[in-house]
Image: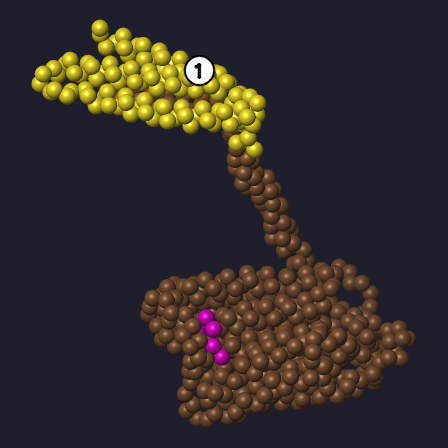
Amino acid sequence: MNLLATLVPLLPFAGFLINGLFRNYLSKSMTGIIGSGTVLASFVLSVMIFMDARAEGFQAVTVTWFDFISVGKLHIPFAFQIDQLSTLFLLIITGVGFLIHLYSTAYMHEEAGPHFARYFSYLNLFVFSMLLLVMGSNFIILFIGWEGVGLCSYLLIGYWFKNVDYGYAARKAFIMNRIGDVGFLVAIFLMIAHFGSVEFGDVFGKASGVGVGAVTAITLLLFVGATGKSAQIPLYTWLPDAMAGPTPVSALIHAATMVTAGIYMVARSHVLYDLAPVSQTVVAVIGVATALWAATIALKQNDIKKVLAYSTVSQLGYMFLGLGVGAYTGAVFHVMTHAFFKALLFLGAGSVIHAMGGEQDMRKMGGLGRRLPVTHITFLIGCIAIAGIPPFSGFFSKDEILSAAYAKNPIYYWVGVFTALLTAFYMFRLYAMTFRGAFRGTDDQSRHLHESPVAMTLPLVVLAVLAAVAGFLGIPAVFAPNAHWLARYLGPVVGEGGAEVERGMGIILIVISVVVALIGTIAAWARFGRKPELGEPAGFGKVLANKWYVDEIYNAVFVRPLDILAQVLVFIDKHIVDGIVNGVGKLVQYGSRQLRLLQSGLVGGYVLLMVVGILILFLVELFVKK
Amino acid sequence: MPINYYIFLSVALFCIGVAGVLTRRNAIVIFMCIELMLNSVNLLLVAFSKMHHHALGAAVPNAGIDGQLFVFFIMVVAAAEVSVGLAIIVMMYRNTHSTDVNFLNRLKH
């Protein structure tokens, strides 16, 4: 177990080193094999760990590598914790990660060799960091992974660094994440101050003894970190811009894994959140607000990846709603199903973009269903899954969150259901505009339309199967008592889910959400199936198409004043600070130039000075020193 | 004679020596001015020596003798200095055909 747990993150790291250091010497196929192979090996090892962890009565194992930080009474070991929650994430990260690596070997095939290897080394480094994040046994290791995935996200968004806009998007993601990270860091400092430790076990054990105020502060600050990484209001605007990266990156980092780090962190710290009802309410409100907000924006986006990006933000909002109402299992369940169907949707979108020769605007697509059969069918499965139509996976996880939300406060439920309606609507708008109707691209594109190679369709098929059946891991109690495998599996880590609704009510809630999802689906299909939305939006639609002008507001409220402040500071630095520094130098130079005149080389002058000096000494002796 | 006269005389001589060193450019004159300063000091030393001898009288037989000893030291040192200094001046004259000290401003460069 120790060896396995050590190897799981080390293998991708080795892949990163090999691909990164030898990128000029490795052939592209070799790079692909190393990049994907290391992640596949990690996946196999993760499955072996998982086989141990699923046994009844499995106790969490801590694997310590070395003493990382040791200052005074504070000891932070570099240690991994293997328990049910981390093994589940291991499977998601390495499993979905491998499929996306495989997909990338085909998708990125047109890149030059060194850049191809650079791409794979970044991807491997990302997997390594993400594994650190979920395996760490304390908040510091978690934070190292947290920063590592942030770095890789930045590097991969800016992968095509010659495009200035992409570089700008990468910087935006990085800076937005930094804002959240400050909150996370302060939370860690508070933990050290209150608990004297950052180990999960110590912190959760002592949590009930420090008072609600401190725990509320810590959990709120942790949540600030989560809003940055998991793209929640108010720090969500980086995620749609992050679509500048290659599509598999969007699938892996900005849909399936990295953005769920915030969910993982909150679920991991659920002991703290259970003690702080205020924080729980904040998490739930922000989550449900983000879900609705992002879903409205997604309604009017025309870029296929932007729709999926806002849909991701919206689904992450659902997960936070689940966390906020105490349905930790439900949130983690949704992380898992979302990883499957959203990775599937992104990869499907990538396949479409690949076939269209880089075109991302849905208004120029249409009728692709006949030309890309595998992509079409798998994409449709993904849409059904995310819309929440049974028996596909999204239905189970979303419904679990929604019924827990109803038990806590029906308002959450109704907002959530309305969001589900919007979700079904915009997803099938996307589907209809892309795959239905007549082809609207150029003749040139029409001739080149082709189904993607098997390295791309295979991950699509695997993910489609998972997206279709993964829901059965968590069958709600209203259908069959004790059939919720995931709740039993995660029980030892996250406890008994949130509040339950009674059985009759539960069935009503399920029926409502299914009907709503079907309404959304049929409405979108009827509206866009034959007549796609091509014109420029007007009125309220224009506000949505422009994302509620949030970017513009942020620019005006934060970016512009900061720019002005920066310019003022530059002026101060250049003219005042530099003036003082240079002035001191100039003064010394001037003074020495004047003093140099004393050294005339004339002996008489020196003697005169000597005499004057002696006289001065005499005068001092006579008159001053009394 | 009161000691004041000796003091004023030697101070006057010393000041003349200093002024000469500062103002004259001829090395030999400067040299002479230095001798003047040395000798003004000698005069003062002898005067004080005599004064102490008189003041203490028979009680201390050798009172003030050290002042006179110093004078001999200074004379010897001055003689040695003159021999070295004149040699330098002679060499200087051979090299520059002048005894003007301002010619010797090479230290500056």
Amino acid beneath label 1: Gly
User: According to the rendering, which colour does chain A have?
Assistant: brown
Left or right of A383, for residue A151: left
Q: Where residue A520 sits in the image (x, y, percent)? A: 70, 77
| Front residue of A473 and A602 | A602
SS category of the residue bearing label 1 = helix
Residue with the most extreme right position: A443
- Magenta stretch contains residue A139: yes
Q: Residue A229's quadrant in the figure?
A: bottom right
Measured as percent of width and height from the top left, residue A589 is found at 55, 35
Q: Residue at x 36, y 23 (%)?
A: B79
- Asked if B26 appears above or below A114 in the picture, the reply is above
Q: Is residue A582 magenta?
A: no
Do we see residue A47 in this rendering?
yes
Q: Position of residue B38 (x, y in %)?
A: 35, 19
The residue at 58%/80% (across/down) is A14
Residue matched to label 1: B20
Q: Position of residue A534 (x, y in %)?
A: 82, 68
Q: Residue at x 25, y 16 (%)?
A: B46
- A584 left or right, relative to A431: left
- Chain ID for label 1? B
Chain B as rendered: colour: yellow
Front position in the image: B76 or A299 = B76
Vertical arrangement, residue A339 with respect to residue A535, above or below:
below
Residue A460 in view, yes or no:
no
Identify the residue shown where x is 63% and y is 90%. A469
| Color scheme of the displayed model | by chain
- Furthest-top residue in this view: B1
Give the magenta range. Answer: A135-141
